[in-house]
């Protein structure tokens, strides 16, 4: 953490409403919730969860930290360290983050949606960094702990771009109360985390909780769940900017073409003729992510030349739609997460890139609740109807996809059912040939990256 990033003891007490148990250091170089990685001078927040309690490590943390925020005092007070008592350490962390945000002159952009949040957030940041000092949320730290930790890093930036995730109703509302976004971006609505939401309508309503906080909202105009909501959002006084491939969107892509290095398109964001963008990434979904980034950039008067330059140099996000070679085959690995919408898009990409055989190595899509069997069967039906030659189904739920694939497919198609990445690796080793195109995709919990480990 930047050593210039200072918190005073007075600020911490004011932000948390805490009580000073022990006075030591008056300044802290940053915040940490992990005693293993804490740096000298930081303030340790002892969070408690279902399977962990940071209070067990307070004394370890205070060997380096200048102080700690706790719900009960450490077993052995450490001389020279400040200890602050609060009723709830998570609420204290969130209070410190909110205090930091409100005490800084910064424009906050919140990015939410079912798919593409992380890539869109990174693209937005890449473009805005051409002209501004930007704080970008780290990785996918997008929940009630991650968002406050990211906000705590504010230190002179003009813009903060924060990813906001949700797994149940009210989550976005809670994050917005902490971050107070000025601009919102909703990438799309799809069947992700349905175990917590129950329906697509609830997913949409939860993502659109951000509309109650922002002055401007950027929406995917091609999303059938979002487009009908635009008139009501505008009626409530929010300025809406839409993006998409359809002609009615404010920011559009036309003349979309695949290239040797990725995908190209003509970007229209104000000009009649548009500008050519060479995006070094696979997938139509990344065109949508780029359009969302361009829409945000318009609000900050970023020139089209800067937008084109930033997008053309964008290298993507680790574990999202990466190309690699495996025994003479082209492998598309999309290993971070999976839900029905992202799975369908990845399969389409596999089919569009195939030269010889198309092989789909697919792991279970998790957190779909009562929808899980239906969702996996639909994937199997889609695979059977498309020119996909081989399915390697990994996991119990993907067995449903295999059943559909086998019942509908012609006899020249192959299917293998396995339970672990290691088994999938052995199957792939035995069947892959030069010129094949392979898709490897599944939910993060399936750990399919092990398939490609050397």
Image (cartoon, rainbow, N blue to C red):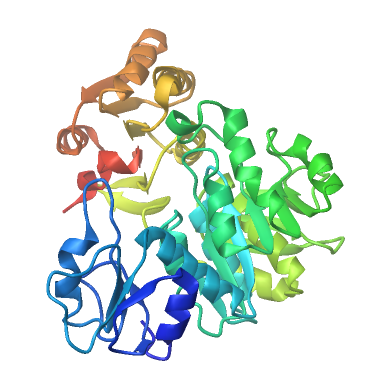
> Where is 228 relative to 308, above or below?
above
Q: Is residue 414 left or right of residue 208?
A: left
Q: Is residue 44 left or right of residue 233?
A: left
Give the quadrant of the C terminus.
bottom left
Spot occupied by residue 86 in the image (x, y as percentages of width and height): 36, 65
Residue drawn 58% across and 82% down?
133
Q: Residue furthest top?
A: 407
> Where is 112 relative to 379, above or below?
below
**Foreground: 251 or 425?**
251
**Foreground: 171 or 22?**
22
**Foreground: 348 or 87?**
87
Spot occupied by residue 350 in the image (x, y as percentages of width and height): 45, 38
Quadrant of res 159: bottom right
Spot occupied by residue 308 in the image (x, y as percentages of width and height): 66, 69
Quadrant of res 55: bottom left
Residue drawn 67% across and 70% down?
307
Spot occupied by residue 5 in the image (x, y as percentages of width and height): 43, 86
Residue drawn 62% across and 58% down?
290
Q: Residue furthest left?
A: 76
> Where is 404 relative to 363, above or below?
above
Give the quadrant of the N terminus.
bottom left
> Where is 9 relative to 338, above or below?
below
């Amino acid at each position: 953490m930047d050593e210039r990033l200072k918190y005073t003891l007075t600020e911490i007490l004011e932000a948390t409403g805490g009580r000073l148990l022990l006075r030591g250091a008056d300044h802290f170089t940053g915040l940490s919730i992990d005693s293993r990685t804490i740096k000298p001078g930081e303030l340790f927040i002892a969070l408690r969860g279902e399977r962990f309690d940071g209070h067990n490590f307070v004394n370890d943390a205070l060997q380096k930290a200048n102080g700690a925020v706790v719900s009960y005092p450490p077993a052995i007070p450490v001389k020279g360290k400040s200890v602050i008592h609060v009723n709830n350490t998570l609420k204290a962390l969130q209070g410190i983050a909110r205090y930091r945000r409100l005490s800084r002159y910064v424009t906050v952009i919140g990015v939410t949606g079912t798919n593409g949040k992380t890539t869109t957030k990174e693209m937005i940041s890449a473009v805005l960094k051409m002209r501004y000092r930007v704080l970008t949320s780290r990785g996918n730290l997008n929940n009630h702990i991650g968002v406050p930790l990211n906000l705590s890093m504010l230190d002179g930036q003009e813009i903060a771009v924060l990813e906001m995730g949700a797994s149940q109703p009210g989550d976005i509302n809670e994050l917005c109360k902490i971050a107070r976004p000025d601009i919102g971006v909703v990438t799309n609505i799809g069947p992700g985390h349905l175990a917590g939401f129950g329906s697509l309508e609830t997913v949409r309503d939860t993502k659109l909780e951000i509309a109650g906080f922002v002055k401007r909202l950027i929406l995917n105009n091609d999303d059938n769940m979002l487009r009908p909501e635009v008139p009501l959002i505008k009626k409530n006084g929010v300025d809406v900017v839409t993006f998409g491939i359809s002609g009615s969107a404010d920011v559009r892509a036309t003349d979309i073409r695949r290239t040797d290095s990725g995908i190209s398109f003509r970007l229209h964001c104000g000009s009649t003729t548009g500008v050519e963008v060479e995006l070094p990434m696979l997938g139509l979904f990344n065109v949508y992510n780029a359009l969302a980034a361009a829409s945000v950039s318009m609000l900050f008067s970023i020139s089209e030349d800067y937008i084109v330059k930033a997008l053309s140099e964008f290298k993507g996000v680790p574990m999202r739609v990466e190309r690699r070679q495996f025994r003479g085959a082209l492998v598309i690995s999309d290993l971070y997460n999976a839900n029905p919408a992202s799975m369908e898009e990845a399969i389409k990409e596999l089919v569009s890139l195939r030269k010889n055989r198309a092989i789909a190595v697919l792991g279970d899509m998790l957190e779909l609740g009562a929808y899980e069997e239906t969702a996996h069967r639909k994937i199997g039906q889609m695979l059977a109807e498309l020119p996909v030659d081989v399915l390697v189904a990994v996991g119990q739920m993907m067995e449903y996809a295999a059943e559909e694939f086998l019942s509908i497919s012609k006899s020249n198609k192959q299917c293998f059912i396995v339970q672990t990445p290691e088994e999938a690796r052995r199957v792939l080793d035995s069947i892959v040939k030069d010129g094949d195109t392979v898709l490897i995709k599944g939910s993060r919990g399936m750990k399919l990256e092990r398939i490609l480990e050397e």
